[in-house]
Amino acid sequence: MFEIAIIGGGASGLAAACALAITLAQGYGSCARESVRIVLIEASDKVGRSILRSGNGRCNFSNLAIDPDCYNDPSFVHDVLRAFEDAASRHSVASFCEYPNGVIGFLADAGLLWEEAGEGRVYPITNKASSVLDILRALMEKSGIEVLTGVRVSKIVPAQGAQKRFAVHLEDESVLHADALIYAPGGKAAQSIELPLPLAPLRPILASLATTERDVRVLDGIRVHARLSVLRDGAVIFADEGEVLFRKYGISGIVTFDASRFASAGDALVLDLFPDRELDDLTAFLIERQRIMDKMRMMPACALDCLSGILLPAFASVMLKRVGIPENASVDESVLRILARQLKHFELTCDGVGDAEHSQVMRGGIHTSVVERTTLEATDIPHLFVCGEALDVDGPCGGFNLHWAFASGLLAGWVLAERLQGESGCSQ
């Protein structure tokens, strides 16, 4: 019997297991389980925890606008996703139906109803991540995949000598053996597994950012819509628009998570609270607004009044203190120009990741240079496939990372299954 071990029960490992088992069953028929044994090993007590956490429990599992250029290694991702879509077209059950991409197609073939919920983000129609996990678990149960939970892998020794079998060392000092292995642990789990492949340094991304300024601590819980730019040595290295949530340690929110892929300690984080207005236009608007307010109140508005209705009082107070203007100070055109500049350029200093424990992705992992782009097989270790977050690949929020996890896992499973079908038959 040919034995296959899958390390990791997250999105990528589950997808690989399902693709592998379904394809083998279609090829081997009734004797698939007697020919191949598939064992999935997960360190936590349940599989699919990363799926359940995604999208605030809704599971943003793909995007209608997947673009390799959105990832940190676009050339590698381009080739992998092209190979994946080719494989998906071969393995689609509902050949009469066209899907936006192969990840959506695979899950839809398995029974998942989905919907696009703005900005191309794709969710299960139930808006529950458990629906995606239920689909995958049902496929695994029907396919007879063995699942070991609460089992931690400490070291993987590739096949050596005539035996040609992988040795999977567990933390309890026991050893499992396999003829082929799909390596798909999450980024954090991969740190503790010894594997003879070069590893890029790991760091948390898609996370909140800490800031050095103490004055913004009073803004904890306040949300603003802004364009967030990351500047390094005066050059913009990231800019996007969205909701920014102030925390006691810094800032959070989806646009901040995306910025964390680029920002490092010492970088400037600049909030433009009026991204749709140029500075001169905003200044003119504030001047005209001040004239109308003075006329309505029949007396000049003070500096704090000028920001009332634009910012919450706590934020207005912080901004006025930054520019040295008392809250009750009288206002003229020069003051309004200063406030306009602050509204367009409210600057913070990055002090690194704010909450590493709740980061959505770990950047780093196995170098893509040691993995074949069309198969995800390790270049120098036959029958070892690497997928998901175990590879040094990451993308922005919006379903890009789960799409990569599913796509790379499915590709690894399909490639291994096709190879086994080509090398052997039911009598194995």
Image: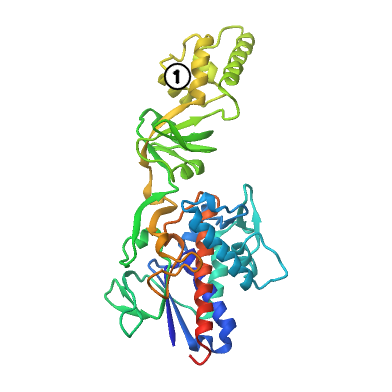
Q: Nearer the viewer, residue 123 or 168?
A: 168
In which quadrant of the rendered image does the N terminus lie? bottom left
Q: Nearer the viewer, residue 350 or 357?
A: 350
Whether residue 224 is visible to the viewer of this picture, yes or no, is no
Q: Is residue 353 visible?
A: yes
Query: Compared with residue 345, is residue 229 higher up or lower down, i.e. above or below?
Result: below
Please tell me which residue is depicted at 66% across the width and 73% down the height of the picture: 93
> From the viewer's perspective, is 318 left or right of 418?
left
> Which residue is tagged 1?
320
User: Farthest residue in the right direction?
Assistant: 96
Q: Nearer the viewer, residue 419 or 169?
A: 419
The vertical placement of 216 against 189, above or below, is above
Q: Residue 369 is drawn in which quadrant?
A: bottom left
Residue lying at 44% horizontally and 31% vertically, measured from the top left: 219
The residue under the point 41% across, 21% down is 322
- Spot occupied by residue 159 in the image (x, y as percentages of width and height): 34, 78
Q: Residue at coordinates 29% horizontally, 71% vertically from top-left?
A: 171
Along the viewing direction, whichever of 49 and 270 lies nearer the viewer? 270
Percent coordinates x, y for residue 228 in the rendering = 49, 35
SS class of the residue under badge 1? helix
- As shown in the figure, which amino acid type bears the numbered disc 1? Leu
Q: Position of residue 423 (x, y in %)?
A: 50, 84
* Residue 396 percent across, percent down from the top left: 50, 49
Can you name the residue that lies furthest to the top here? 299
Please state if 79 lies on the left or on the right of 40 as rendered. Answer: right
